[in-house]
Image: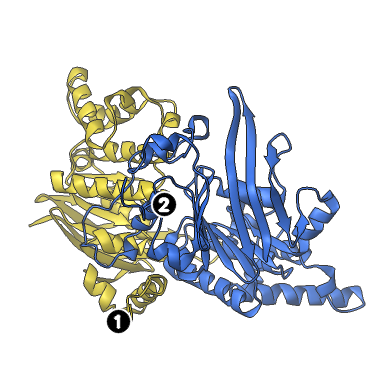
């Protein structure tokens, strides 16, 4: 069952021509994509291939130029930002930003950070919101007391957990993450991976993420999207992409990864 | 004989509640022609060790070591002049953040030409020398894989993308043809293709010029593919060190095992989407370091004896410091 359908999503960045300056044109898409319930999709590609842009367009952090996004049989034009459709969308699709620590307000305690999406998007009273937030903190492996903590009192891993809690506090159906594991240390990273896998099982979340770490991509992704120059050049199941890459860009990425991985040959 | 030999390096910082040992009896050695990896998570003191070798630590921090020598000469008792000479010609450092460690007010070309030692420049007249300098700069830049030298040599540090900056730092380090290259997290945030390019460059330099490399990183995949030996740090203590082959095959310290497990690429038998084995808890901050073995509170094998700092034990050239290492099954 498809939970999200993206049709012809297009974004055009057009810097106008001035006297001596050549026009800079960057076009993303048209992107077509369908996401199933509980599915994990990884977006890989070079720098400046439009990965982060695609993530932002999907969430609606940036308005697109054309195309439509369908979530739960409810259609949105990605181009318009009418109040009503924006409101609904924030419930079903949420985002984790790249630097979780920098995307949190340092002068506000964790409880308030998590309270904000609830306060702005739901009609719940304060007494109703607090137990939801505490539940959420426990769910991502923090303590109830962390409600009163500030950002600087938390370690990297805990900050990542708060960012995750903030993303899932509205019970979204789709979670989009921009390099969620890049800034983390190995041991904290595997904790976060485990946490996301667990939450996906519990909540049936669809998870779309961008990563450079192909080891983790191979481990948790169901499907992989390869991007180059603003276009999706290849798309397929994880094992298929890793074993039989078709496009030159994919081949490059996969061979670069394979050359690092210790090869288990017959000798061993 | 090791080129760089450090024994029991201790770094103490004064704080409001007594001295904090940011580095506690760290041992490290790099032989000539060897790629040694220094592995640790953030806050484990990797970068502090790099600064200690450079002599770039603030003077109010108390640095002591039983031995810290470069080719048999004591680095700690050297005069500033001698030390600078060594750092200029024999050891080169690639720092972590290229955008922050390059001079923002000079173009990359000027900076690179400045770091070419005078002996390498041929020609007797100033224009010949300037020309030759430029030629060396361009060839070095090509060597590290930057193609559009014209564009990048005349660019300022803020105008270039991070991965070019990183490659440029490597070019600047290599131009004086050092004996030891210290690379502090050189592949951070790079995409896989650029990363393999850089790693191949390092391997090639190591093989052709027998350049020793101290590779500081926490990217185990990169480390495992190129380095000969490895030293693992945790919260300022050396945890395990030895040949890469042996450590990968049979880690003795629980922390090393956890690190290796955290990279799913190492394990072919791991079913996709299964939970990764992890250590609970998080990395301790400098203010709240546990006593004894600093892994203690997170370690699955910890026992009462772990409040004493374990001594370094040795099996052939495989050193580890743990009271209950993994090959002792009985607890």
For residue A266, which numbered disc appears in the image? 1
Drawing shade for chain A: yellow
Residue B190: horizontal and vertical position, in percent?
47, 62
Q: CA distance from mark 2 to mark 1?
A: 29 Å
Drawing shade for chain B: blue
- Marks 2, 1 in one chain: no
Residue B77: horizontal and vertical position, in percent?
80, 48
The chain holding disc 1 is A
State the quadrant of the C terminus of chain B. Answer: top left
**What residue is drawn where x is 43% and y is 45%?**
B323
**What residue is drawn where x is 24% and y is 66%?**
B269
The chain holding disc 2 is B
Residue B146: horizontal and vertical position, in percent?
59, 72
Residue on which the image places disc 2: B253
Q: Name the one closer to the observer, B324 or A14.
A: B324
Helix or strand or loop: what does disc 2 sit on? loop
A84 on left or right of B169: left
Few, some or many residues within 10 Å of mark 2 (<14, 14–19, 20+) = many
**What residue is drawn where x is 47% and y is 48%?**
B41
């Amino acid at each position: 069952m498809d939970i999200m359908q993206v049709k012809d999503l297009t974004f055009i960045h057009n810097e106008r021509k001035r006297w001596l300056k050549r026009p800079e044109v960057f076009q993303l898409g048209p992107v077509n994509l369908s996401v199933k319930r509980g599915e994990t999709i990884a977006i890989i590609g070079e720098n400046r291939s439009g990965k982060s842009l695609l993530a932002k367009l999907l969430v609606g952090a940036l308005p697109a130029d054309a195309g439509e996004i369908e979530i739960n049989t409810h259609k949105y034009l990605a181009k318009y930002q009418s109040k009503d459709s924006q409101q609904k969308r924030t419930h079903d699709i949420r985002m984790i930003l790249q630097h979780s620590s920098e995307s949190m307000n340092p002068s506000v305690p964790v409880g308030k950070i998590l309270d904000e999406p609830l306060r702005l998007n739901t009609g719940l009273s304060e007494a109703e919101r607090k137990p939801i937030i505490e539940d959420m903190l426990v769910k991502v492996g923090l303590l109830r007391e962390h409600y009163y903590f500030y950002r600087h009192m938390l370690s990297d891993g805990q900050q990542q957990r708060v960012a995750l809690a903030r993303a899932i506090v509205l019970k979204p159906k789709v979670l989009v993450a921009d390099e969620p594991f890049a800034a983390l240390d190995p041991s904290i990273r595997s904790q976060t991976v485990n946490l996301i896998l667990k939450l996906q099982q519990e909540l049936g979340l669809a998870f779309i993420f961008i990563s450079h770490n192909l080891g983790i991509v191979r481990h948790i992704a169901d499907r992989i999207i390869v991007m180059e120059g603003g276009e999706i050049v290849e798309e397929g199941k994880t094992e298929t992409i890793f074993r039989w890459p078709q496009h030159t860009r994919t081949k490059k990425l996969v061979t670069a990864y394979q050359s690092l991985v210790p090869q288990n040959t017959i000798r061993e | 004989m090791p080129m760089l030999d450090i024994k029991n390096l201790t770094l103490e910082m004064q704080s409001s509640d007594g001295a904090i040992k940011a580095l506690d009896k760290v041992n490290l050695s790099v032989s000539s022609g060897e790629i040694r990896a220094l592995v640790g998570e953030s806050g484990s003191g990797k970068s502090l060790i790099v600064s200690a070798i450079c002599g770039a630590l603030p003077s109010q921090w108390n640095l002591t070591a039983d031995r810290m020598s470069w080719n048999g000469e004591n680095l700690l008792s050297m005069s500033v002049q001698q030390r600078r000479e060594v750092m200029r010609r024999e050891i080169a450092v690639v720092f972590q953040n290229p955008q922050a460690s390059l001079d923002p007010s000079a173009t990359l070309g000027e900076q690179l030409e400045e770091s070419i030692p005078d002996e390498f420049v041929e020609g007797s007249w100033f224009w010949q020398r300037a020309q030759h300098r430029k030629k060396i700069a361009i060839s070095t830049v090509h060597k590290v894989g930057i193609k559009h030298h014209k564009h990048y040599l005349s660019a300022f540090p803020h105008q270039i993308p991070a991965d070019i900056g990183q490659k440029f730092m490597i070019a600047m380090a290599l131009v004086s043809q050092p004996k030891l290259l210290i690379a502090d997290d050189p592949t951070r945030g790079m995409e896989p293709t650029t990363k393999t390019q850089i790693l191949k460059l390092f391997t090639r330099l190591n093989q052709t010029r027998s350049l020793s490399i101290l590779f500081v990183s926490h990217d185990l995949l990169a480390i495992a593919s190129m380095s000969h030996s490895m030293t693992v740090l945790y919260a300022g203590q050396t945890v395990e060190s030895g040949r890469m082959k042996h450590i990968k095959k049979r880690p003795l310290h629980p922390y090393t095992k956890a690190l290796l497990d955290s990279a799913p690429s190492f394990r072919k038998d791991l079913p996709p989407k299964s939970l990764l084995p992890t250590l609970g808890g998080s990395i301790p901050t400098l203010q709240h370091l546990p006593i004894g073995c600093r892994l203690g509170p997170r370690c699955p094998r910890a026992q009462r004896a772990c409040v004493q700092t374990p001594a370094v034990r040795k099996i052939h050239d495989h050193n580890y410091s743990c009271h209950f290492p993994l090959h002792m099954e009985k607890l």
